[in-house]
Each structure stands twice: as structure tokens, then as C-alpha cells.
Amino acid sequence: MVPVKKESNGKEYYVLKCPRCGYEEKASREDLDKYGIKYVVESSKRTVTAKATEAKQTALSPEEREMLQEYYEILLESMREEETEEESD
């Protein structure tokens, strides 16, 4: 049995249909869940929502601040060395 979408009087519903003989029986929600049928909502019926989150302020520890300062000093020093090498070439 295979789920098949049908329409009657403007309403859509699903039936389980035998692909060999054509026998049909109305499918329940449980039957469709077993087959993994997904329900699609038209874009005109969708509601746009937004999720707000609270901003958390992260404070650096003194050790982290010191490490960052050393990192930036090394970075700036290497950039200065590259500039002087480019100027001398």
C-alpha cells in the first residue's frame, strides 16, 4: 500500500492505494506517520516569527587580557617587519 493524495469537494486527504490492484482505503494520521509523509504549509499561510535572545556580556579574565595583548604585540611587530622587508626590496 502506498499513500496517495486525493481531493474531494475542495478538501485534500490521503488514501493508501495498492499499486497492483488499485484497492484504496482511507489513511489515518498514524498510517501516514509510518510512511513518513510530510505536510507542507503554503507560504501564504505561514507566520513569520522572530526569536529574541538576551545578550550576555563576557568579561575576560586578567590572564586572557594579557595573552591577547601579547598576541596583538606580536602581530603588529610581524606586520612592521613585513613592511620593512617590502620597502627594502
Image: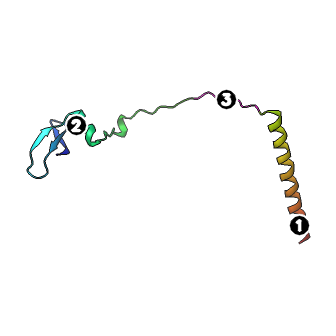
Rendering quarter of residue 54: top right
Residue 83's x, y, as percent?
87, 62
Q: On residue 31, which mark appears? A: 2
- From the viewer's perspective, tell me whether residue 61 is left or right of residue 47: right
Magenta-drawn segment:
53-59
Say which amino acid is labelled 3. Answer: Lys
| Image location (x, y in percent) of residue 6 | 17, 42
Which residue is depicted at the point 36% across and 37% down? 44
Task: Tell me which label, 3 or 2, sits earlier in the chain.
Answer: 2
Label 3 close to label 1 by CB (< 8 Å): no
Nearer the viewer's eye, disc 3 or disc 2?
2
Which secondary structure class fits the magenta region best? Answer: loop
Horizontally, residue 47 falls left or right of residue 77, namely: left
Which part of the image, by quadrant, shows the C terminus?
bottom right
User: Regarding mark 2 in the picture, which secondary structure is present there?
Assistant: helix
Which residue, given by chain and number where applicable, does mark 1 sit on?
Answer: 85
- Residue 66 percent location from the top left of the image: 85, 39
Task: Identify the mark nearer the N-term, 3 or 1.
Answer: 3
Measured in 3D between alpha carbons, the distance from the residue under mark 1 to the one under mark 2, in whole angstroms, is 73 Å
* Nearest to N terminus: mark 1 or mark 2: 2
x, y (%) of residue 3?
Answer: 20, 44
Secondary structure beneath dot 1 equals helix
> Horizontal placement of 77 versus 58: left or right?
right
At label 3, counting other C-alpha atoms closer than 10 Å, the crowd grade (few under 14, some 14-19, many 20 or more) is few
The crowding category of the residue bearing disc 1, from other C-alpha atoms within 10 Å (few below 14, some 14 to 19, many at least 20), is few
* Residue at x 80%, y 38% (from the top left corner): 64
Question: In percent of the image, x 16 and y 46: which residue is there?
Answer: 1
The residue beneath circle 3 is 56
Q: Amino acid at mark 2?
A: Asp
Most foreground residue, 37 or 8: 37
What is the distance, in whole Å, between disc 3 and disc 1 at their CAs?
Answer: 43 Å
